Amino acid sequence: MLPGIMGLLQANEVIKLIVGIGETLVGRLLMFDALSSSFMELRLRRDPDCPVCGSAPARSPADVAALAGQ
Ligand SMILES: [Zn+2]
């Protein structure tokens, strides 16, 4: 059941990005607590010094995925 809930939320985000409507979760982290059926949201800011997504990345997202074994 939980993978279905999260997959539905992810698919909804993709549709909003493709169609260009609504408010996406870009810059926000949405967390779902299945035991209490509640959502919590955190606003995230990009770290300009991040080695992956910062202003001068030292590693590409592909490097990170390779390190994670994906
Ligand atoms: Zn980053």
Image (cartoon, rainbow, N blue to C red):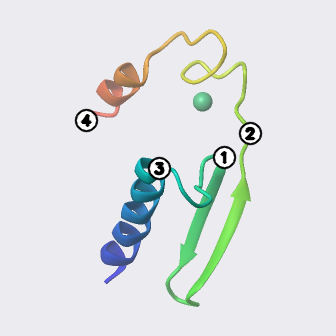
> Counting residues from the N terminus, which is met first, the one under dot 1 or under dot 2?
1
Name the element at disc 1. Answer: loop
**Relative vertical location of residue 60 with respect to residue 65 in this rendering, above or below:** above
The disc placed on residue 70 is: 4
- Tell me how far mark 1 sits from mark 2, CA to CA: 6 Å
Q: Position of residue 41 (x, y in %)?
A: 69, 65
Q: Position of residue 22 (x, y in %)?
A: 58, 61
36 displayed left or right of 4: right
| Mark 4 closeness class: few <14, some 14–19, many ≥20 residues within 10 Å | few
Mark nearest the camera among 1 and 3 is: 3
Mark nearest the camera among 3 and 2 is: 3
The disc placed on residue 27 is: 1
Which of 4 and 50 lies nearest the eye of the viewer?
A: 4
The disc placed on residue 17 is: 3
> Counting residues from the N terminus, which is met first, the one under dot 4 or under dot 2?
2
- Tell me how far mark 3 sits from mark 4, CA to CA: 24 Å
Hey, which quadrant is residue 25 in on the image?
bottom right
Which of 22 and 41 lies nearest the eye of the viewer?
A: 22
The residue identified by callout 2 is 45
**Callout 2 amino acid:** Arg
- Tell me how far mark 3 sits from mark 2, CA to CA: 19 Å
21 displayed left or right of 41: left
Ligand 1: which quarter?
A: top right
**Callout 3 amino acid:** Leu
| Mark 3 closeness class: few <14, some 14–19, many ≥20 residues within 10 Å | some
| Mark 1 closeness class: few <14, some 14–19, many ≥20 residues within 10 Å | few
50 displayed left or right of 52: right
**Callout 4 amino acid:** Gln
Hey, which quadrant is residue 53 in on the image?
top right
Q: Position of residue 35 (x, y in %)?
A: 52, 88
> Counting residues from the N terminus, which is met first, the one under dot 4 or under dot 1?
1
